[in-house]
Image (cartoon, rainbow, N blue to C red):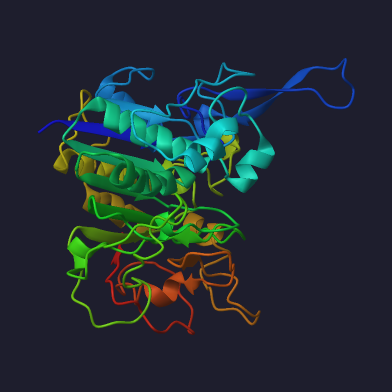
Amino acid sequence: MTTYTVCFAGTGCSRDEGEETRHWSRRDWQLWMNETRLKSHKDIYHSDTGYIPVRLHKEISGVLAETEPSVTVRGVGENDWHSQMDKSCELLTEPLAAPKDLLSYIKSYSKGNQRSVPSQLTGWASAALALHGANLAEKSGATQINFIGHSRGAVQAIMAAWFLYAYSKKKVPVNIFAIDPVPGTGEWYSIQTQLAPNVANYTGIYAWDHLDVGFSALVPRPNAQMTSQDEITKLGKSWKSLAKHYQLADPLARGELDQPTGYELYACRGRHGTVAGNTTSDGLYDPTKASALAAPVPELIYKMARGYLAKWGTTFEAPCAVDESVLELRRKIHTDHAKFDAMGCGETRTSRLPSRPYVRQVSSISGRKPWDTYYLDDVAGDPPYKLAFPVTVERKNAGWVNWKFL
């Protein structure tokens, strides 16, 4: 069995995110004035983990630009490399037999300068990047595909599995390690909220302390082979609706189904960036705020990602850079948790304000309704009492899938 690994970067991240400090050229209304502005400083990331999807690719293939036996895919609204001020590398549209409506939709996102704040906000380029990743996987000829992604990159991994399932003549199993998948605002497609039938394993990491509006996390529904439900019989007519007739049991709702196999959901302290390698005390982007107290979360997720990918057949050239055990890292997270409490507005999350503003929202529901969400501290159930996970007194109605708390 040969394994190919595709590493999807998150929104606004280049293929050398965390390895290089990136600037954008800026020209405002004073056209004769040119300047550059900082977009991402490599020092916000832990030196041992880097930005996890990119660093893992480097540890698999040895060189950032390498495309065998792993590859990176740039993030939405960014070019491939930090040095590309006004151009990107053209995305693949073959060898998958993608339909004309998809090829037409992705055309403007497949080449040219992709650095765009509006594009980062809308996320419309996700389909182009997902198809590119799926084409890279198909082109590799591997007999097993591993996807790892962060943010919209994790969502693209879920979409890419559907493109392989629908547009490839081969039946190759796909494994997905998703780090805080967030589609953003707007429509959530059916191919995002449901795992494709070719997905053999899904592991999702979800940041407990990220409360920003518009950052509801995606929890895709397990497929039939994971849950002994009826298999898919009909695909939707368009690429967006491939899974329209295949929305299986909602993992966030109450239910009596047996626990799924090959499907694991983890809750972890920290913000959206923290779980991907960011060590700043507030989970934001100022390198002067890098803190050793936030480091155990990136170290833990990096170590877990390597472990799952290795279990699924990925071979690493470089040894694991984190020596501490998973148990020791978890002990550090829950012994000195003040930084993580502050990221989510304090140690106490119950509020007199309506709509529980200090609780992360998640969803598994396709469509355009922004209120179709759940509260994470409802659906995940009660954390173990020895672990420092702030919850609200209002929590109720845990979902039928059991969560694990890191």
Q: Which of the pair 339/252 is nearer the observer?
A: 252
Front residue (pair 74, 245): 245
Q: Residue at x 27, y 71 (%)?
A: 402
Question: Going 42% across and 44% down the picture, which residue do you hit?
Answer: 156
Of residues 181 and 227, the one nearer the viewer is 227
The percent position of residue 79, horizontal first and vertical second, equals 55, 25
Q: Is residue 124 placed above or below 46 in the rendered structure?
A: below
Tell me, yes or no, if residue 295 can be seen here.
Answer: no
Q: Is residue 146 left or right of residue 275?
A: left
Q: How many numbered callouts?
A: 0
Image quarter hosting the C terminus: bottom left
The quadrant in which the N terminus is found is top left
The quadrant holding residue 36 is top right
Residue 200 at what x, y percent from top left?
A: 20, 52
Q: Position of residue 326 (x, y in %)?
A: 23, 49
Q: Quadrant of residue 306?
A: top left
Q: Decide: is 130 above or below 199.
A: above
Q: Is residue 273 visible?
A: yes
Kindly give the residue lying farthest to the left in the view shown.
Answer: 1
Q: Decide if residue 100 is on the left or right side of residue 62.
A: right
Where residue 131 appears, as percent x and y from the top left, is 41, 37
- Looking at the picture, does residue 216 appear above or below residue 1? below
Query: In percent of the image, x 53 and y 28: which residue is there?
Result: 110
**Depth order, front residue of 34/43:** 34
Compared to residue 112, the image places residue 346 above or below, namely: below
| 323 relative position to 370: left or right | left
